[in-house]
Image: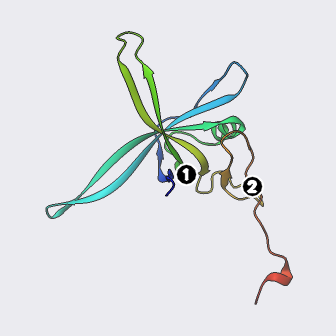
Amino acid sequence: MSNVNTVTVSGNLTRDIELRKTQSDFTIGNLGLAVERSKKVDDDWETETSFFDVTVFGGTAEFVAKKLRKGDLVTVSGRLEQQRWEDKETGAKRSKVVIVATAIDSHGLFRPKDEDNQLNFDGGGASEPAAAAKPADDDIPF
């Protein structure tokens, strides 16, 4: 049986996207996402918030940086990745789990005329929203 590593979360951006460039001029974007859920405690409902770091790459990172702002509602699909490093000051080994985005749905914020509002990419590059497929008049069954 093969391993499955897929995650989809909806929430609000906790900050504007932070962009940086690699030495080869490749763009990497980082953003924060707050995801709320309700849970019942005794006879009351309480809201619990989880915070996630999200990484997005290439032209998509640049496009998202132009269109999204702190507080915007988005759905992010991708994979989980554990990042490991050594603390420069203490030498302690550190790690965190981030979401590496493969699709970002802006709930309508990306929707220019005649285009879909979901960005799908291969992790390295597509930077424009996919055009929405429109059925021909002959394909409509009514």
Residue appearing at x 68%, y 46% in the figure: 122
Relative to 13, is 56 on the left or the right? Answer: right
Q: Using the numbered discs, state the Cα–Cα distance from disc 1 to disc 2 in whole angstroms.
A: 16 Å
Q: Amino acid at mark 2?
A: Ala
Q: Give the quadrant of residue 88.
A: top left
Q: Which residue is mark 2?
A: 130
Residue appearing at x 51%, y 54% in the figure: 2
**Residue 133, placed above or below residue 106:** below
Residue appearing at x 75%, y 58% in the figure: 115
* Marks 1 and 2, the one that precedes in the sequence: 1
Locate residue 3, reporting x and y percent: 49, 52
Locate residue 94, reporting x and y percent: 38, 24
Label 2's element? loop
Q: Among all residues in the image, which is located at the extreme top? A: 89
Q: Which residue is mark 1?
A: 77
Answer few, some or many: residues within 10 Å of disc 1's Cα (few below 14, many 20 plus, some between 14 and 19).
many
Q: Amino acid at mark 1?
A: Ser
